[in-house]
Image (cartoon, rainbow, N blue to C red):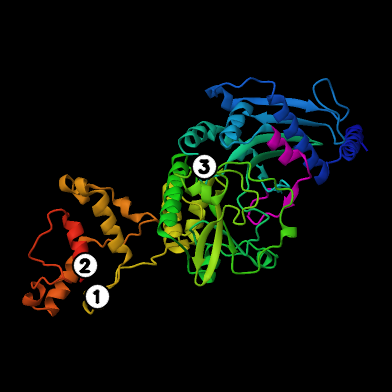
Amino acid sequence: MSVTTVESLETGTKASKLSKDHKKPTAAALKGAIQLGIGYAVGNLSSKPDRDVLMQDFSVVESVFLPSEGSNLTPAHHFPDFRLKTYAPLAFRYFRELFGIKPDDYLYSICNEPLIELTNPGASSSWFYLTSDDEFIIKTVQHKEAEFLQKLLPGYYMNLNQNPRTLLPKFYGLYCIHCGGVTVRVVVMNNVLPRAMKMHYKYDLKGSSYKRRASRKEHAKSSPTFKDLDFQEMHEGLYFDPDTYNALMKTLQRDCRVLESFKIMDYSLLLGIHVLDRKPLSRGSRCDSRRGQKVLYSTALESIQGTVKDPEPVADDETMGGIPAKHKDENLLIFLGIIDILQSYRFIKKVEHSWKALVHDGDTVSVHRPSFYADRFLKFMGSTVFKKLHPLRGASSKRKRGSLYPARSASQEFLSQQRSEKKEEKKTQSMDNLDGNFYSSSEQPDLVPKPTVSFECAQNIEEDLDDSDIRRGSNSTVALDDPLPSLSRSQSDTELDVYL
């Protein structure tokens, strides 16, 4: 045996001994290091004065070593030695303040009790941890995702200042832990699906159809997460009142345009459905450690209602911020949020789309260019998943012919109220100049038909009734030959449609 061979064997033996001595940390040790690291980073920020966020703050990375025996700057702990990196600490402190998260509450949620490990239904290898009070999700991310998020921070900062009510993920911190030869990067986000509310159905929706069905392994879980094709088979659509539907779709459209501007695609809508008609959870099974909502705009209902004032904490709110909806005869609460937005349309994604397009229809695969992905996503959500309720529709002309003096309806109350309140305005201003959304509020349903509907009703009536009968002008009818000077064209047509 040559000397070189002996030296190589000795080198391999030393390397194996070093690898055996250098043990990887356990899952419990990693969770403890994450909690301790975040606690140290947030506590260290308290010594820094508050100031405006500058452009260079988004690229700052602070690093500190935390030995198990402690040091002059770090506390002693029972975990293996580890190094902590904190990304853009001042920028994320601003984000937390924007959502009303106090440092003490943030530390209490993350560090007070052990983290709860969640299963990952997606194709990624990320780990998910949930804080015991349901407030925050801690997700592990890859190096490219962490790097992309840091580059995204200036645009994210601008978007949150313009619109804090969004269904996009709310990022509260980005950290990196080097422990025992293992590197873990984690991001702290808002929790979309509260654990205290049972989700009878969960969906991960992208608007694509290629391989968008839950696997057999996922079906076997106690709480599976289904996909697009499963939704079309199990639900015909979720119905909302017109105002809620419009607010939801407007929020989704705004968020998708923001993602498109950042060249982001392959994101999903995480949808949780709680059926109110089924047996609710007992008080004992609710999250007893929940002290009330600490994060503003974090619930689904707050995220889509842009005109609602800042809510107070709702510790005993049974709806947990869910959006009311209906499916057939069932009353539902909907919880939703856009997830997985850290996938940019880089070169590798372009190659993936080209390869999948060769074996399948390119427009049905999930990976696609950002503009096409956003349009397909919005079309699927607005037509297949979410639908608008039409509880009050104008009756047909055939139904109105038999009664010339119907009971006082909501449309009559609406018209009489408008005439009494705005009598002076109608003399100088036409109703056509008013905003089209005025009639679509929840308090005043959209019962005023379009002029084309009134013309059709008038044509049907003229075919069935003689001109002499129409022009008699008795106490119970409206004389058509006598114009109404105080009403605009649309209102006069509406009065005609109501009375006839």
**Mark positioned earlier in the residue sequence (2 or 3):** 3
* Residue at 83% across, 27% down: 75
What element does badge 2 sit on? helix
Q: Quick one: label 2, few (<14), some, or many (20+) residues within 10 Å?
A: many
Q: Quadrant of residue 184?
A: top right
Residue 125 appears left or right of 371: right
Residue placed most toward the observer, 360 or 206? 206
Q: Amino acid at mark 1?
A: Lys
Q: Which of marks 3 and 1 precedes in the sequence?
A: 3
Q: Which mark is residue 346?
A: 3
Q: Are marks 2 and 1 in contact (CB under 8 Å)?
A: yes
Identify the residue shown where x is 86% and y is 29%. 76
**Residue located beneath label 2 in the image:** 497
Q: Amino acid at mark 2?
A: Asp
The residue singled out by tag 1 in the image is: 400
**x, y percentage for residue 356?**
51, 56
Q: Which residues are magenta?
A: 104-126
Q: Does the magenta segment cover residue 351?
A: no
